[in-house]
Amino acid sequence: MENSLSKKLEGLLIKLREKKFKEQLLELTIVRDCVAHPNFYIVKDSWKRDNSWGKSSATFPSGVKHRDKASKRKRERYERTKILGLPMVATWISYRDVVMCLIIVSHFCIYLNASMAILMPMWVVFLFRIRPMEFSKTWRINLAGLYRLMSGLGHFTIHSHQMIKK
Amino acid sequence: MGLFETALELLQRRAYPVYKKNIERREPPISHGESTPSGIAVLLIMTGLDHHLSRLKYLRDHASDSLVDPRHTLLQMGNGEFLI
């Protein structure tokens, strides 16, 4: 209970086939750290000739470095995480990134429920309407959940099969 | 309201309308109206997950002997039985 979330995740996901999943969850903790312990970035924004936005870049001032956990999981040229491509600059976090976080976290809760019989929070049950037998269809359910969240239809209840059929 | 629920509500009520308005532009810079509630939502989700795991560990390792029996009479009601 006294350990940090990263330590807890490393303790729960120890199998070889869980490695990538663990890395994804650790990337979420990096994004969380970006909000909770923000760094100072030099951000360059650009405009095109037609007044539309160009590419933005963010760099650290000289002498500032990422923590070990973050620098191991960062893309070389971008301030984004390796696997999920989540932004490491607090002001770059968008709605889609949070939906991605929700999917990974709910996937983790479902996984714990299926593999270790650990209870999942009720919002996951309501959000994805999961029964234990449906674990093999988790990815499909998650896609449906993503669709529902992106469409923003209000209530957090979905029927996965209906959404897939559409 | 719990941490997860607050995060979901922030996402739906604050971030989503701005996301919908700027849906053509998905690269940084992100509007503050979208990035601020989204950042807070990430913070709440991960803190909620941490809290959830800690609570489960506490329930399993420390409080398992002192838990109230979940087989309460109200929960054992069958079909067609009603509270008077």
Image (cartoon, coloured by chain):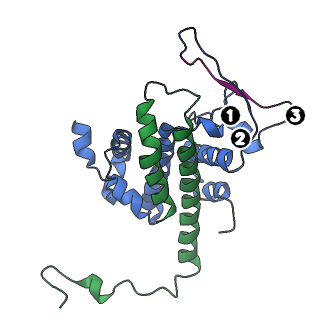
Where is the C terminus of chain A found, in terms of image quarters? top left
Q: Nearer the viewer, mark 3 or mark 1?
A: 3
Give the residue number, with chain letter if any, for mark 1: A74
Query: Farthest residue in the right direction?
Result: A63
| Mark sitting earlier along the chain (3/1) | 3
For image coordinates 22% across by 83% down, the residue present is B77
Q: Are marks 1 and 2 in contact (CB under 8 Å)?
A: yes
For label 1, the SS is loop
The CA span between labels 1 and 2 is 6 Å
Chain assignment, label 1 = A
* Chain ID for blue: A
Q: Main secondary structure of the magenta part?
A: loop
Q: Which residues are magenta?
A: A52-61
Please give the label number shown on residue A70: 2
Check the image and report above or below for A80 versus A34: above
Give the residue number, with chain letter if any, for mark 3: A63
Q: Colour of chain B?
A: green
Q: Nearer the viewer, mark 3 or mark 2?
A: 3
Instruction: Specify whether residue A116 is painted magenta.
Output: no
Looking at numbered disc 3 in the image, what kind of residue is underneath it? Answer: Gly
The answer to which of A117 and B12 lies nearer the viewer is B12
The image position of residue B76, as x and y in percent, is: 26, 84
The CA span between labels 3 and 1 is 18 Å
The image position of residue A135, as x and y in percent, is: 36, 52
| Mark sitting earlier along the chain (3/2) | 3
For image coordinates 40% across by 59% down, the residue present is A123
- Rendered image quadrant of residue B21: top left
Looking at numbered disc 2 in the image, what kind of residue is underneath it? Answer: Ala
Q: Is residue A52 visible?
A: yes
Check the image and report above or below for A146 versus A82: below
The answer to which of B51 and A92 lies nearer the viewer is A92
